[in-house]
Amino acid sequence: VQLQACGGGLVQAGGSLRLSCEASGRTFNNYPMAWFRQAPGKERDFVAGISWSGGATYYADSVKGRFTISRDNAKNTVYLQMNSLKPEDTALYYCAAGRTRYGAVLTAISNLGFWGQGTLVTVSS
């Protein structure tokens, strides 16, 4: 079971990036998914979450209106579109899946059972 996150990179403030998280070895089509991030020296924080069906989403206040989470269950992939990036968005971004199927949006780390390896996003000022 593997969650492979990619799409990170170096971008100037105000720019955009799209992160992808593809599952292999197992299908996560029926699981809620989420993105978290961890800046150097800080805790891992919730960024965005999506329900198993894609019908519900939830965002951290710091990214609301700038980031969009979505999923393509046919491709077993979750996305995070990040616009209007700020230097404070610099972090290692992780995707994660819930522990059980058919769950609602998850925001707490303890509720996520499967984690990807992280992709680095660096926003320069």
Image: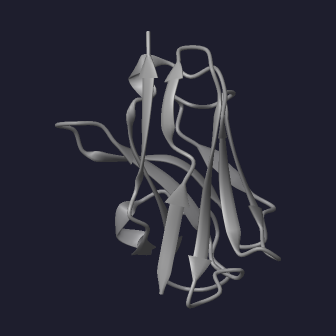
User: Is residue 115 in view from this perspective?
Assistant: yes
Instruction: Please identify the quadrant where the C terminus is shown.
Output: top left
Image coloring type: one colour
Q: Residue at x 61, y 69 (%)?
A: 22
Q: Position of residue 108 (x, y in %)?
A: 41, 60
Taking the view exactly as shown, the residue that stands out farthest to the left is 41
40 horizontally vs 4: left or right: left
User: Is residue 51 in view from this perspective?
Assistant: no
The answer to whether 12 is drawn above or below residue 80 in the figure is above
14 horizontally vs 119: left or right: right
Q: In terms of depth relative to the viewer, which is nearer, 92 or 35? A: 92
Taking the view exactly as shown, the residue that stands out farthest to the top is 125
Q: Where is residue 61 in the image (x, y as percent from the top left)?
A: 54, 31
Q: Residue at x 51, y 54 (%)?
A: 35
Q: Position of residue 42 (x, y in %)?
A: 22, 38
Q: Where is residue 20 in the image (x, y as percent from the top left)?
A: 62, 56
Quarter assignment of residue 63? top right
The answer to whether 50 is drawn above or below residue 84 in the figure is below
Q: In terms of depth relative to the viewer, which is nearer, 40 or 63? A: 40
The answer to whether 79 is drawn above or below residue 25 in the figure is above
54 horizontally vs 122: left or right: right
Quarter assignment of residue 25? bottom right
Quarter assignment of residue 37? top left
